[in-house]
Amino acid sequence: MITCPNCHHQNDGGNFCEKCGTRLTEGEAVVVGGASAASVETVRPNEHLEKAKNVSKLYFGYFMSLLKSPLAKGSRIGEEHFVNGLITIILYSLILPLSMYVALGEYGRYMDSAFLTIVIKPTLAMAVFVFLMSVFTFCAVKVVGVQVTFKSAVARFGAILVPFIAVYVLGLLMSLFEIYEFVFVLGLGLFGAIFTAPAIVVMSYTRNIASKFDPLYGIILTYVASFIVFALILRGFIMNMIDNLGIFSSPF
């Protein structure tokens, strides 16, 4: 039904009012409105896609600059790169379990929910561990007496992980080509980051700071706290793997 703008008569259709003969234009307005709505719906996905591309480009530039000069640039990273630091922590946590999943190949089919067990759960556990390690590092910096924000410490910790992600990627490629020495490469990426990142971050903040509490003790406390958490997570992971493989289950 189209309402006449002159006499308000309800018309079934047509270009002119059945009662007073006034030209009807509402139909055109409806069509135009519909077209504009459709165009908005078409544009929105493109806007999201462009934003995703821009974020990817920015992170890629950030990653490559740190890969070229990890110590020089990583030691100057501030809280403006907090989000990039979190993304780096997530990537670092993902690649190790993914490499193990690729290496297991067809053997993973004997496990219940192999991808969940080998990739998803370990990635979450690893992300929690690495994030807690960055928290312990922040606490060590604060104990020494440096005025630093939490976001700044986490951003700098994530920046130092960049070269170890490159080591992880090398291990992942080796596992794809069934080069079994990939385990040693992944171990280098894991323990290299655990031992290196806290020390570099703490020293980057305390190089020119005089404090009664020596930074070395802060680093040692960070290692102790980190390895306690690591041992607990590793124990839970091993028990979960044993349960899924059914190693100790009776065949009868």
Image (cartoon, rainbow, N blue to C red):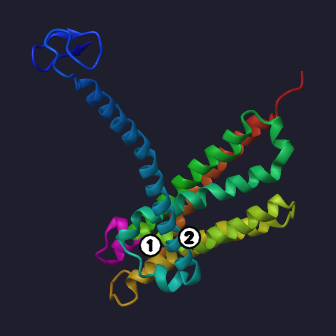
Which one is in front, 193 or 160? 160
Alpha-carbon span between mark 1 and mark 2 = 9 Å
Task: Specify the quadrant of the image occupied by residue 32.
Answer: top left
Task: Specify the quadrant of the image occupied by residue 145.
Answer: bottom left
Left or right relative to 213: residue 2: left
- At 65% from the left edge and 51% from the top edge, which residue is drawn? 234
Task: Specify the quadrant of the image occupied by residue 155.
Answer: bottom left
Which one is in front, 88 or 228? 88
Q: Which residue is mark 2?
A: 161
Q: Position of residue 207 (x, y in %)?
A: 40, 88
From which residue to which does the magenta span run?
140-152
Q: Position of residue 251 (x, y in %)?
A: 89, 25
Which one is in front, 7 or 18? 18
Residue 94 vertical position relative to residue 136 in the rendered view, above or below: above
Within 10 Å of disc 2 (Cα), the crowding (few <14, some 14-19, many 20+) is many
- At 84% from the left edge and 67% from the top edge, which residue is drawn? 181
Q: Position of residue 89 (x, y in %)?
A: 53, 61
Amino acid type, label 2:
Leu
Which quarter of the image is occupied by the N terminus? top left
**Would residue 115 be counted in the magenta stretch?**
no
Which quarter of the image is occupied by the C terminus? top right
Residue 86 vertical position relative to residue 75 in the rendered view, above or below: above
- At 70% from the left edge and 41% from the top edge, which residue is drawn? 115
The secondary structure type at the circle numbered 2 is loop
Looking at the image, the residue that sits furthest to the left is: 7
For residue 156, which numbered disc appears in the image?
A: 1
Q: Position of residue 102 (x, y in %)?
A: 78, 52
The secondary structure type at the circle numbered 1 is helix
In the rendered image, is residue 214 in sight?
no
In the rendered image, is residue 175 in sight?
yes
Residue 112 vertical position relative to residue 75 in the rendered view, above or below: above
Amino acid type, label 1:
Arg
